[in-house]
Image (spheres, grey):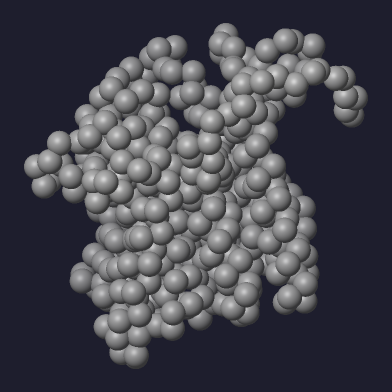
Amino acid sequence: MGKIEKKLSSSQMIILGFILVIFLGSLLLMLPAATRDRRGAAFLDALFTATSAVCVTGLVVQDTAAYWSLFGQAVILALIQIGGMGVVTIMVILTVISGKKISLKQRSTMQEAISAHRVGGIVRLTGFIIRMTAAFELLGAMLLFPVFCREAGIKKGLWYSLFHAVSAFCNAGFDLMGSREAYSSLTAYANNPVVNLTIMALIVIGGIGFITWDDIRVNRFHIRKYRMQSKVILTAAILLITVPAFYFFFLEFSGVPAGKRFWYALFQSVTTRTAGFNTADLTVLSETGLALMILLMLIGGSPGSTAGGMKTTTAAVLLSTSVSVFRRREHTRFFGRRIGEEVIRNAATILTMYLVLFLLGGFVICRIEHLPLLTCLFETASAIGTVGLTLGITPELSAVSHGILILLMYCGRVGGLTLIFAALSGNQGNTARLPKEKLTVG
């Protein structure tokens, strides 16, 4: 294993780690004990579910509560936890538990996996991530327990509380509500403040990123001392929650009482950027509302978090670059700091990759399934953004379409640049510079 590790780049180790966990999870879900009928799941169903869990997406082909046994649900929960914290984080934890030293290669891989700025202190940061994850998930479960206990009894209520707390914190969107329709999610709790606030808080905390947590821990509420990245992440998170919430409140869910519409609007705004839970029937939204949700799903959460998508910082860099062009500034800037050209190129590359995969997947599924294009694009945006929201078509799709969604979920969780760097690992860039020529754009 050590020899293999030395030959692999950090990006390749991340990719391989996710693949191994997905296939191991698939094998466990194919066991007879994993399903309620004791027959085990078909390979494609198991693979789809394992991929969705590890990639913290939440799209399902079988109802999580009705189809999977307690053992199967426990496997799904374990896969969600591994996928949310990151395969590399789990590997580091196991290495520490076994008493072995963390190699420089493992530290470098961990740095890339959680988007840390330096290798130094990475083991300490890993310990902080573990403690905070456990604390937030247990606190969320405690807050949810009185609600679920009152409706399902102590044992089932305890399991429901833990499952949904972990699923929310990891931005996975899996639920145990047991509805016939996989897309109903938390609609029964649309007007429940405890469930709404707890789930939304867990989603936001999990989605802002481990590095931002560390900034808040060290600097408390002295925002001026925060890293520039943390400031950009928190600013983007606030804007991406409040602005869509205003849209949903004033322009969607007409006829719903104001109090319930408030919870509808706020919850849908929070959950759309990778969590996958929903408290409202999404099929009643206008095409404009669905298009807005697609945009939010593609943006996703923050780097180094439990969330997916092309990341809030990517969108922020591209927007700031556009503003700099409009104002004829030479450099992109945030909070009095200049952004390097490499970061801008990476952001443009990530946007291009996500758009190509999202559109291509939607077009292919539309042609294969003969479904409305917007519906198919909603599904592919949900997959590559690792969100899990659906308009109800996922269980009915063909094997080919399921395969497309599996690939999109995997690419969305691993990340576009990680895939590129893994494929090009070992290739030395050409330092020769070609003659410069002017090209008119726009």
Q: Name the side, left or right, on which 37 lies relative to 180.
A: left
Residue at image position (47%, 77%) is 45
Q: Position of residue 133 (x, y in %)?
A: 28, 44
> For residue 407, which quarter of the picture?
bottom right
**How many marks are shown on the rendered structure?**
0
- Residue 434 at least partly seen: yes
| Quadrant the C terminus occupies | top right
Residue at image position (85%, 19%) is 437
Residue at image position (77%, 72%) is 367
- Residue 241 at least partly seen: no
Q: Position of residue 75 (x, y in %)?
A: 30, 68
Q: Position of residue 86 (x, y in %)?
A: 36, 47
Front-most of residues 92 and 37: 92
Q: Name the side, left or right, on which 24 lies relative to 338.
A: left
Front-most of residues 229 and 438: 438
Q: Is residue 62 above or below residue 292?
A: below
Q: Is residue 349 above or below residue 334?
A: below
> For residue 317, which quarter of the picture?
top right
Residue at image position (36%, 23%) is 118
